[in-house]
Image (cartoon, rainbow, N blue to C red):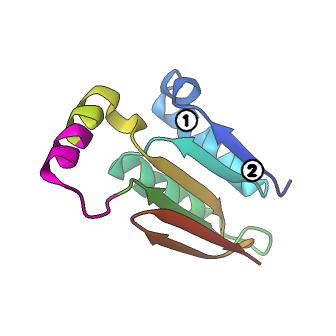
């Protein structure tokens, strides 16, 4: 409780969508921060947020989600390389951080870094 768990893309891709989101949600609800290789789909994020809202209580106050992709100003050749990597890597491109809002005070994102302030 209160740690950080890194979940690989390989682990999550083998789970059906419901079990994948249940695993992420249960981990966050227990008080851990989850780091995921890649990105959740828009539907998965919506479902996860809806599930969190349905479970808000005195002990569980919700979740915070942030995604780091590295979108700084890039040359045309770097943008092309990134598109090729994204095409090959799919949703593994980037890093998603999900944590309980009870312990995450603020998440600041810019193109080059992600800062997580804890309470």
Q: Which residues are magenta?
A: 71-82
Q: Give the residue pinned by disc 1.
A: 20
Instruction: Find residue 86 and report its image quarter.
Output: top left
Using the rendered image of the protein, determine whether residue 49 is visible from the camera's viewpoint: yes
Query: From this viewpoint, which residue is outermost toward the left?
Result: 76
Q: Is residue 101 magenta?
A: no
Pick the quarter of the image with the C terminus.
bottom right
Residue at left offset 26%, top offset 42%? 82
Using the rendered image of the protein, determine whether residue 53 is visible from the camera's viewpoint: no
Query: Residue 10, position in %: x, y?
Result: 53, 24
Q: Give the residue pinned by disc 2.
A: 4
Residue at left offset 39%, top offset 53%? 69
Instruction: Find residue 73 and report its image quarter.
Output: bottom left
On the rendered structure, is 112 left or right of 80?
A: right
Query: Residue 8, position in %: x, y?
Result: 58, 32
Query: Residue 53, position in %: x, y?
Result: 56, 67
Q: Secondary structure at mark 2?
A: strand
On the rendered structure, is 11 left or right of 86?
A: right
Query: Residue 63, position in %: x, y?
Result: 60, 65
Residue at left offset 75%, top offset 71%? 103
On the rendered structure, is 61 left or right of 83?
A: right
Q: Is residue 78 magenta?
A: yes
Q: Earlier in the sequence, mark 2 or mark 1?
A: 2
Q: Quote the CA–CA distance across marks 2 and 1.
A: 17 Å
In the image, is residue 118 above or below residue 16?
A: below
Q: Secondary structure at mark 1?
A: helix
10 Å neighbourhood of mark 2: few (<14), some, or many (≥20)?
Answer: some
Point out which mark residue 77 bears. Answer: none
Residue at left offset 80%, top offset 70%? 59
């Amino acid at each position: 409780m209160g740690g950080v768990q890194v979940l690989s893309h390989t682990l999550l891709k083998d789970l059906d969508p419901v079990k994948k989101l249940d695993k992420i949600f249960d981990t966050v609800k227990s008080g851990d921060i989850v780091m995921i290789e890649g990105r959740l789909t828009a539907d998965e994020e919506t479902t996860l947020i809806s599930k969190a809202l349905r479970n808000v209580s005195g002990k569980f106050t919700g979740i915070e989600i942030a995604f780091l992709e590295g979108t700084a100003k890039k040359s045309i050749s770097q943008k092309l390389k990134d598109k090729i990597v994204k095409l090959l890597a799919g949703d593994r491109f980037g890093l998603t951080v999900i944590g309980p809002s009870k312990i995450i005070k603020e998440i600041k994102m810019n193109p080059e870094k992600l800062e997580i302030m804890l309470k």
